[in-house]
């Protein structure tokens, strides 16, 4: 995310995709200076670049260049002076694209940019997780429910309030349909049936998911999907299994109790692992699909050996 720093106070802020500076309390960043207009200037992301547009009465100075009702492209290291007072000068530290983010609402504000996957309160004991689907839609998952978080929706976790801010702009949509269409999930069981290796193959490319605790969960769901495909069920009906039945099956197979919390933890770790799997793991981050009380493997091309 793009950041700018006040050259006097050293206060650092993350830029929204449309970030207004001015005296108005409705500004993204309020500036308390008499020669600053209520809506003085806007920093905005467009066409893969950051720009500044002055719409003030007195103008804005960008690295010594005077702007008045005009637009200038921003570059890292530039300074932006909104008024005569030194406290109205900011330095551009970063010009990365805007991202959705989580904002901590307490006396010590904190911003967490959302790049691919993030869990609250932490990844070891996730209570709520945020992840991005292949079509750049952000989802939240909590207590077995997957949903699309609303802009400025507040989530309470560990007695802290976090606000989800929708800030990302997608200039163009990349069609990954061919990757998913040609992908196969290949499950290989060891001779003693105790380990499960999973690979995703796309034409000549192989992505190894490694050996993890969630692999047998995926295998169980893939088997159910494959059985339903072979039985001729409609794609929308294939593979659905009750969560109770799945946790019972996993408990029996692993000789230890697997409850819904443990199941959700495995799914969180699976999504995180897929986000990091290069080059196309992110395209399968929603491989687990949910509906009320049920769960399924979300891809029809399955090989088990």
Image: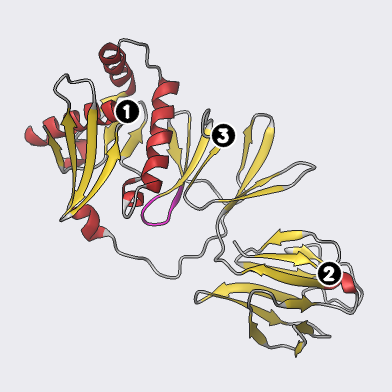
Region in magenta: 133-138
The residue located at (36%, 50%) in the rendering is 282
**Which residue, as the protein is rendered here, is positioned at the far front?**
191
Q: Earlier in the sequence, mark 1 or mark 3?
A: 3
Q: Which mark is residue 23?
A: 2
In space, the residues marked 2 and 1 are separated at their CA atoms by 52 Å
The residue located at (23%, 37%) in the rendering is 198
Q: Is residue 136 magenta?
A: yes
Residue 293 picture location, percent across and down? 36, 26
The residue located at (55%, 48%) in the rendering is 150
Instruction: Identify whether 1 is placed above or below 103.
Output: below
Mark 1, secondary structure of its residue? strand
Give the label, 1 or 3, closer to the camera: 3
Residue 88 picture location, percent across and down? 84, 72
Q: Please report contact status of discs 2 and 3: CB closer than 8 Å, yes or no.
A: no
Question: Dot 1 corresponds to which residue?
Answer: 294
Answer left or right for 251 relative to 78.
left
């Amino acid at each position: 995310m793009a950041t700018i720093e006040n050259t006097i106070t050293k206060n650092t802020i993350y830029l929204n995709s449309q970030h207004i500076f001015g005296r108005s309390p409705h500004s993204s960043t309020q500036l308390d200076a008499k020669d600053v207009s209520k809506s003085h200037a806007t920093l905005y992301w467009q066409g893969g670049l950051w720009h500044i547009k002055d719409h003030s009465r007195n103008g804005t100075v960008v690295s010594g260049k005077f702007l008045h009702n005009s637009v200038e492209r921003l570059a890292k290291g530039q300074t932006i002076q909104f008024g005569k007072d030194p406290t109205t000068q900011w330095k551009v530290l970063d010009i990365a694209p805007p991202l959705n983010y989580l904002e901590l609402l307490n006396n010590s504000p904190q911003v967490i940019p959302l790049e691919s996957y993030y869990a609250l309160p932490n990844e070891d004991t996730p209570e709520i997780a945020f992840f991005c689907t292949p079509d750049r839609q952000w989802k939240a998952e909590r207590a077995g429910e997957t949903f699309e978080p609303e802009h400025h929706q507040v989530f309470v976790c560990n007695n802290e309030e976090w606000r989800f801010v929708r800030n990302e702009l997608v200039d163009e949509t990349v069609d990954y349909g061919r990757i998913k269409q040609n992908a196969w999930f290949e499950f290989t069981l060891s001779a003693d049936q105790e380990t499960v290796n999973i690979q995703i193959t796309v034409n000549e490319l192989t992505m190894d998911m490694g050996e993890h605790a969630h692999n047998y969960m995926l295998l169980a769901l893939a088997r159910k999907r494959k059985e339903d495909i072979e039985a001729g069920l409609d794609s929308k009906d294939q593979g659905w299994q009750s969560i109770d039945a799945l946790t019972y099956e996993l408990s029996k197979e692993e000789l230890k109790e697997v409850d819904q919390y443990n199941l959700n933890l495995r799914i969180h770790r699976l999504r995180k692992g897929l986000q990091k799997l290069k080059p196309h793991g992110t395209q399968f981050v929603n491989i687990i699909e949910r509906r009320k009380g049920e769960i399924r493997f979300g891809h029809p091309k399955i090989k088990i050996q």
